[in-house]
Image (cartoon, rainbow, N blue to C red):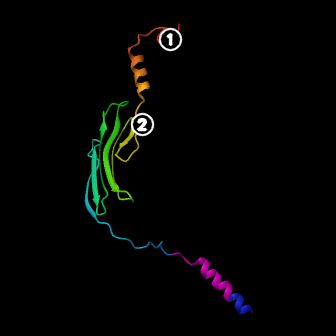
Amino acid sequence: MAHQAISFVALFIAVVSAQRGPPQYAPGQFIPIISYQNEPNQGDGSYRYSYETGNGIAANEQGYLKNPGQKDLEAQTAQGQFTYTAPDGTPITVQWFADETGFHASGAHLPTPPPIPEAILKSLQQVQVSPPGPNRFGRK
């Protein structure tokens, strides 16, 4: 009985102290890189890169330092685009730029706001041509 207890304790210690191996990943299809270009910081804040993969993913980006040396006006800007195929087979392309005003993206797949109703457009036009003053909005 004591022999079984000692064996159990030894086995328990061996299992608990055993090191785990590296994570195993399921082998997948190898996706080749068709093209890759990289021009890192050129010393003036500008850079450029692009790549394309064998499964239809492509991206490019270029950036530069806007207003260099002007403390309050200096800003890093970048622009580029990326393309891939959605799971349903739709090709997706996004053009974008980023600067001191933020990140701005456009693409045919992105939602767009509905058109402004005609009555609102007429109202906005009327406000633009109305002279300023106390009666501008129908008040006396």
Highlighted range, magenta: 7-20
- Image coordinates for residue 118, horizontal then vertical, percent: 41, 27
First of labels 2, 1 by sequence position? 2
Residue linked to disc 1: 138
Quadrant in the picture for the N terminus = bottom right
Q: Residue 9 lies in magenta, yes or no?
A: yes
Q: Is residue 138 left or right of residue 125?
A: right
At horizontal 37% and vertical 57% (from top left) the residue drawn is 86
Residue 90 lies, in percent from the top left, at: 35, 55
Mark 2, residue position: 114
The amino acid beneath tag 2 is Pro
Label 2 to label 1: alpha-carbon separation: 29 Å
User: What's the residue at 60%, 80% (across, down)?
Assistant: 15
Which residue is at the front of the view, 28 or 50?
A: 28
Q: Main secondary structure of the magenta part?
A: helix
- Residue 21 vs 90, above or below: the answer is below
Residue 46 inside the magenta-drawn segment: no
Left or right: where does residue 87 sit relative to residue 48?
Answer: right
